Image (cartoon, rainbow, N blue to C red):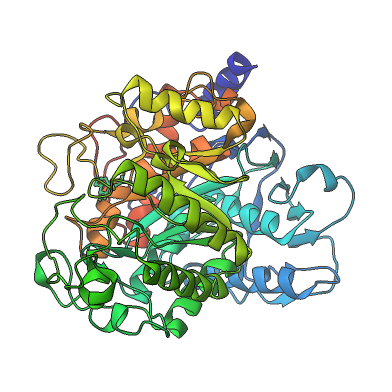
Amino acid sequence: MRRRRLLFSLLLIAAAGLGTAAAEPPGAAGGGATPAATPLDQVVPAPASVRGGGRAFTLGEGTRIRVPGGSGEAKRIAGYLAGLLRPATGYDLPVTTKGGPDGIVLRLGGRGTGQLGAEGYRLTSGSRAVTISAARPAGLFHGVQTLRQLLPAGVERRSAQRGPWRIAGGAIADSPRYDYRGAMLDVSRHFFTVEQVKRYIDQLAAYKINKLHLHLSDDQGWRIAIDSWPRLATYGGSTQVGGGPGGHYTKDDYREIVRYAADRYLTVVPEIDMPGHTNAALASYAELNCNGQAPPLYTGTNVGFSSLCVPKAVTYDFIDDVIREIAALTPGPYLHIGGDEAHSTSHEDYVAFMDKAQPVVAKYGKTVIGWHQLTGAHPAKGAVAQYWGYDKTGAQEQAQVVDAARNGTRLVLSPADRAYLDMKYDKNTPLGLSWAGYVDAKRSYDWDPGGYLKGAPEASILGVEAPMWTETLSTSAHLEYMAFPRLPGIAELGWSPASTHDWEAYKYRLAAQAPRWEALGINYYRSPEVPWPHRG
Ligand code: TNX
């Protein structure tokens, strides 16, 4: 199966006139050459099934985007697609609910879409039409991301470009391996504005990531307004690592992020980290401290020095209020309560705290996610543990996670020496940290979530997540430099069947993304492991 796919890819690469390493990828037309259509199997993440062949589709002046009998959501996705394609093509691309045999067709429901699941889609392309069908709107949206990648990279530019705008003929049937395909952004160590978060969401959506985990509180900053404890945001959010002005989201800001993400089929997973990583809260309210004294705000990068006061009753009033207000802002099922690096909380207190905190999450209708240290306490029924261990994680700690998985705790895998986007690529990387080692593109991609934690049942793996901690990162350019090229690899591990996993083939597909990133103004790292095309 894998051999056949590989052979098939090689044939397509050969057919596209690509020989060996560092060849111009499809769509990277420099100086007036006609961009070749991108072969269907060059998409990232790799689709579940691809059959190339038949005549290409050409997007033209008169192309319509059809949403036959279209519902609100399908029409909105069609409008989003038109918005993506109009600037570079210069075409009108009117959206119509009239059926017809030609154009770009987005079809919800219909024959054979049932088996595609909640996020799958089918895309067929021929001389008259490109049709995306799906059972659910999320599937249409993911199909649209695939369609984008099938067009020449210049389509991502915001000013008129020369065509032709061809899409190779063939058929794709695609659905994800895992339900949970996440990316985390730490907005606490450095604050990121709504606009910066939206830019990151757009980058995640392009690779079919469907969860945005926001790390909203830590020692250095509390980033979300809580009406019942207003100083958390106004004082606790007033600085960041290095002593800058920090910032926080008003509830309206936050709702805007949630809506923008939802429009791109990403669910926001809010995290309030507790009982450790709480200096910003402790600094804001003296009564939360066991000694009744508020510590100063913190702008360094140490971890493990703060703890909520486990024996005090007010601690539970506090978490009840915070979790209630956050849950009310959260349409998705998950609420992350952190639980990592509680080095200033005794084990006994940690267990007692988690025994009290988890039911509060359930009371407000949400499912607990915690960092995997939660498995050292009593994970609630249905809880999810986010594994962030690495090759040096002790056997006992790992066994505890595996045991929990055997007992029904589901896992999201974020191994620090694979999936952490804040790890340096190599010793020369000017940003990031290196406590889990250097993580270049191959290491980040080359592991199997299904077999990663020996002994954890396959069904316990909910998915993968790529966390971005921001002790050293403060601009969108920084985030992009660390996310690209690693993020698409983690996205592929979450989406694509294990049978497509092959670094030697993947690295060419990955390389072929670079002209898109350049067109989008994404600041990426030119890893020496990837056969990048020459800059256009
Ligand atoms: C560990 S990973 C942390 C964070 C740091 C990160 C830096 C985890 C759950 N906790 O507090 O920001 O390392 O890589």
Left or right position of 87 against 287: right
Tell me if I can see residue 220 in this picture: yes
Q: Residue at x 47, y 73 (%)?
A: 257
Residue 367 screen position, x and y as percent: 59, 55
On screen, 297 above or below 471? below
Q: Residue at x 47, y 75 (%)?
A: 321
Left or right position of 124 against 419: right
- Quadrant of residue 176 in the image? top right
User: Which of the image's four quarters has the N terminus?
Assistant: top right
On screen, 474 above or below 118? below
Q: Residue at x 31, y 39 (%)?
A: 533
Residue 407 screen position, x and y as percent: 60, 31
On screen, 45 above or below 498? below
The residue at the far top in this view is: 3
Q: 44 or 159: which is nearer to us?
A: 44
Q: 114 or 147: which is nearer to us?
A: 114
Residue 338 screen position, x and y as percent: 39, 53
Left or right position of 37 against 534: right
- Disc tally is 0
Residue 150 screen position, x and y as percent: 56, 48
Tell me if I can see residue 90 in this picture: no
Q: Residue at x 16, y 78 (%)?
A: 245
Left or right position of 236 against 90: left
Q: 301 or 12: which is nearer to us?
A: 301
- Quadrant of residue 244 in the image? bottom left
The residue at the far right in this view is: 111
